[in-house]
Image (tube, grey):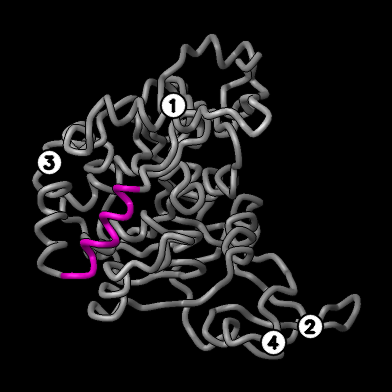
Amino acid sequence: MDVITQGTLPLLSDPDPEKARAVFKKKSRSMTPKVMSASTAVERFVHPGDYLVVGAFGAVRIPTVILHEIVRKHITGLKFGGHTATHDCQILSAGHAFDACDIAYVIGLEARGLSKISRRHFERDDVEVIQWTNAAMAWRLKAAAMGIPFLPARNMLGTDTLEYSAAKVVRCPYTNHPLVLLPALYPDLAIIHVHEADIYGNSRIRGILVADEDLARASKKVIVTCERLIPHEEIRRAPHLTNIPYYCVDAVVEAPFGSYPGNMPGEYFSDEDHLRLWLDKGKDEQDFEAFFKKYVLDTADFDAYLQLCGGLKRMQELRRLEMLPDENGRLDPDQTNGQAN
């Protein structure tokens, strides 16, 4: 196929499926226990230069526990897949953890406002930026999960996003219409927060999946954090509920409330007051540095962070808020793990 036009910026990751396959071949398929602490998981699997993608969407089901550990260990030089990235991007920006980013949605925390913390990092640290759309990022992961070097789409045609991307436009051999080729994205590392996992990494997600099933299959290393560990026998009794199979997973970290201050569907609502505090403190650099030092850098671990934010009492309040009935007085079965009457 002849290339009609193409984006002007370089790829941050290699789309060659054969090179990715060579890495996947070395991954063990044996069912061995993978439970470890957040600190150990980061030490083993997160390295400067890695291309990192965080699972889920916005401030929903983010693996905050691992993100804090990355910046607490002062890991820098990462490449970041900014696919619907809000508070996760803000945390990594605060720690100056990445210096290149494929962006689709960053800086904003949706209806909450824009993050000056993230903006300062992109502008002052001269982060290399390649533009995509949310759909394009999801389809790039889909291509990688399929083991192919690209997927064709019409997404981004006729936009400046295409110009500042690394996509290529070709003439369709069947219709003669222009098509955008979206290169496969094989992250070095994915971090995904799930509802339940067994000790081997078989994982269950309730609610919206976003691109996490493809992300787990596309990534060379996968850290799963979970609200709770469940017996392997439970996985075997209902295998159709497993979204991420054990052979994709390298580490399992049990982390109750591990998505805080984000929302965990069916578990706890987002702490909007605390997210607002991040945004408010971010307006003044000195205020934010003191805040970030107290709440993240100087905490021993994520449990200490939760204690600073109100501890179990606050977590229970957020759990009750997530369980509020709808306007008809009914609980949403999807938000109560099927236990509603």
* Left-right relation of 134 to 263: right
User: Between marks 1 and 4, how big is the CA–CA gap?
Assistant: 47 Å
User: Between marks 4 and 3, how big is the CA–CA gap?
Assistant: 48 Å
Q: Residue at x 39, y 60 (%)?
A: 51
Q: Which residues are magenta?
A: 273-284
Marks 2 and 3, the one that precedes in the sequence:
2
Marks 1 and 4, the one that precedes in the sequence:
4
Marks 1 and 3, the one that precedes in the sequence:
3
Please tell me whether residue 227 is drawn above or below residue 4 in the rendered image.
Answer: above
Q: Residue at x 64, y 85 (%)?
A: 159
Local packing at callout 3 (Cα closer than 10 Å; few below 14, some 14-19, many 20+) is some
**Contact, CB < 8 Å: mark 1 with mark 2?**
no
In depth, the one of 164 and 322 nearer the eye is 322
Local packing at callout 4 (Cα closer than 10 Å; few below 14, some 14-19, many 20+) is few
Residue beneath label 2, please?
178
Of badges 1 and 4, nearer the viewer stands 1
Of badges 4 and 2, nearer the viewer stands 4
Instruction: Pinpoint residue 219: horizontal percent, then vertical percent.
Output: 48, 49
In depth, the one of 289 and 3 nearer the eye is 289
In depth, the one of 238 and 248 nearer the eye is 238
Residue beneath label 3, please?
299
Residue beneath label 4, please?
158
User: Between marks 1 and 3, how big is the CA–CA gap?
Assistant: 27 Å
Q: Which mark is residue 275?
A: none
**Contact, CB < 8 Å: mark 2 with mark 3?**
no
Was residue 279 drawn as part of the magenta stretch in this picture? yes
Q: Residue at x 15, y 70 (%)?
A: 285
Please tell me whether residue 271 is drawn above or below residue 172 in the rendered image.
Answer: above
Residue beneath label 1, please?
320
Local packing at callout 1 (Cα closer than 10 Å; few below 14, some 14-19, many 20+) is few
Instruction: Pinpoint residue 88: horizontal percent, then vertical percent.
Output: 36, 54
